[in-house]
Amino acid sequence: PGQPFAQAARRQLSALVAGKTLQAQCYEKDQYGRDVCALMLPGGSSANRELVASGHAWAYTARRGAYLNDGAMRGLQARAERAGLGLWAQSGARAPWQWRYDCWKQQQCH
């Protein structure tokens, strides 16, 4: 099962990037060797910021923010949460890393 609001987030990302040329601005590799990047949109903003600001994504603050390379993300998320945008319109929103743990490890996928 997918996390609540996952399909809406996919649609928002698709609408944001469809037909555009993006540039990946990579900062580092994570603990699994994957690149940690911002996807830069034409005009200088990033898809990452746009999704967090609209309440369609979380700023990754797990691991004490070890991979949070954009200092604006926490503030964008806080504003979206206060405004009740996107996933913040529902009660009980859980961070993806917590949801995955609860779902996969604890078999609590609701």
Image (spheres, grey):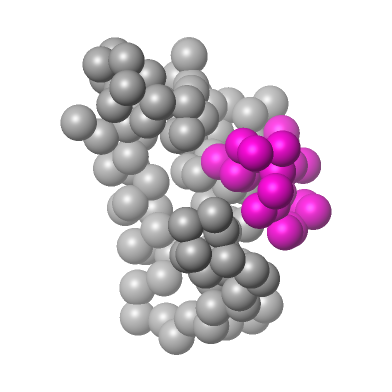
Q: Is residue 32 magenta?
A: no
Q: Hey, which residue is sitting farthest left in the picture? A: 1
Q: Is residue 40 visible?
A: no
How many tags in the picture?
A: 0
Q: Nearer the viewer, residue 83 or 24?
A: 24
Q: Residue at x 55, y 33 (%)?
A: 85
Q: Nearer the viewer, residue 95 or 91?
A: 95
Quadrant containing the C terminus is top left
Q: In screen coordinates, is 66 left or right of 23?
A: right
Q: Residue at x 66, y 71 (%)?
A: 27
**Residue 65 place in picture, x, y as percent:** 70, 43
Q: Is residue 72 visible?
A: yes
**Residue 43 place in picture, x, y as percent:** 64, 80
**Quarter occupied by residue 49:** bottom right
**Residue 93 place in picture, x, y as percent:** 48, 22
**Quarter occupied by residue 79:** top right
**Residue 70 place in picture, x, y as percent:** 73, 58
77 lies above or below 103: below
Q: In screen coordinates, is 78 left or right of 5?
A: right
Please state the extent of the stretch shown in magenta in the rendering.
58-78
Q: In screen coordinates, is 53 left or right of 97?
A: right
